[in-house]
Image: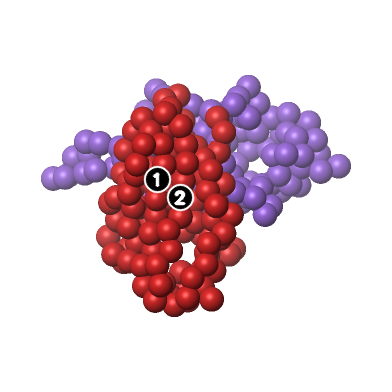
Chain colours: A purple, B red
Amino acid sequence: EVQLVESGGGLVTPGGSLRLSCAASGFTFSGYTMNWVRQAPGRGLEWVSSISGTSDYIYYADSVKGRFTISRDNARNSLYLQMNSLRAEDTAVYYCARILLYCSGGRCFYEYHAMDVWGQGTTVTVSS
Amino acid sequence: QSALTQPPSVSGSPGQSVTISCTGTSTDVGRYNRVSWYQQPPGTAPKLLIYEVTTRPSGVPDRFSGSKSANTAFLTISGLQADDEADYYCSSYTISSAYVFGTGTKVTVL
């Protein structure tokens, strides 16, 4: 079964740091671009960051650039988000999500730029 | 990057059709056919409904359909059912190699 499981959320004071993890299973993790998406309480979805399968391409939303760092360990099938200088407005459920790939005959060719597998989310609360 | 604009809510009776709009700009929705739609029932993670403007993943009923005109994408739900009640979000790939989501639309089945 294809699955993503986030962990590492919790309560942190403003200015503090937190590291989120996302454990992947049931697919060839290294072949997929991965994302972090967050959702503040009662609000909509906000894309945070993405990282390609080989970590060659990394992108961030302007709202987190310079404070958050995305990384992955393909040997451990894991995705990470290091969050520093946290602010109240970073309070949210954080989801990891996989980018949909077109694959045929055991090879993958094309990214559809849509997120087809999501974890259940981990909650980050920034408050004093 | 500003969020794509969706109506806050739409409603319809069982069996009716509803359409949700998603308006962006020439740097996202208008530039690429890389618009996707997600369904999010309360307290759950989003689920992919449509990708590449019109394509449904396997398992998504054909009651859900997508389209696009210029800078605006649309999701139509035909034959509305009670379990279609959820929040719906559009998303687009952008010229900056980023993603932007819509503001979200709550669908209510009357």
Q: Which mark is residue B73?
A: 1
Q: Residue at x 78, y 31 (%)?
A: A15
Distance in Å between CA atoms under marks 1 and 2: 6 Å
Q: Is residue A6 visible?
A: no
The answer to whether residue B4 of the structure is visible from this angle is yes
Of residues B97 and A119, the one nearer the viewer is B97
Q: Name the spot of residue A34 as percent of width and height, x first.
A: 43, 39
Q: Is residue A3 above or below residue A47?
A: below
Badge 1 marks a residue whose secondary structure is strand
Disc 1 residue type (three-letter): Ala
Residue underneath mark 2: B21
Residue in the picture at 39% in, 64% down:
B77
**Is the Cβ of the residue at disc 1 closer than 8 Å to that at disc 2?**
yes
Residue A17 versus residue A101 in the image, above or below: above
Number of residues whose C-alpha sits closer than 10 Å to that of mark 2, classed few (under 14), some (14–19) or many (20 or more)? many
Under tag 2, what secondary structure?
A: strand
Q: Residue at x 46, y 55 (%)?
A: B20
Q: Nearer the viewer, residue B66 or A81?
A: B66
Mark 2 — on which chain does it sit? B
Label located before the other in sequence (1 or 2): 2
Instruction: Give the x, y percent position of residue B33.
Output: 32, 38
Viewer-proximal residue, B94 or B18?
B18
Looking at the image, which residue is at 45% across and 24% down?
B96
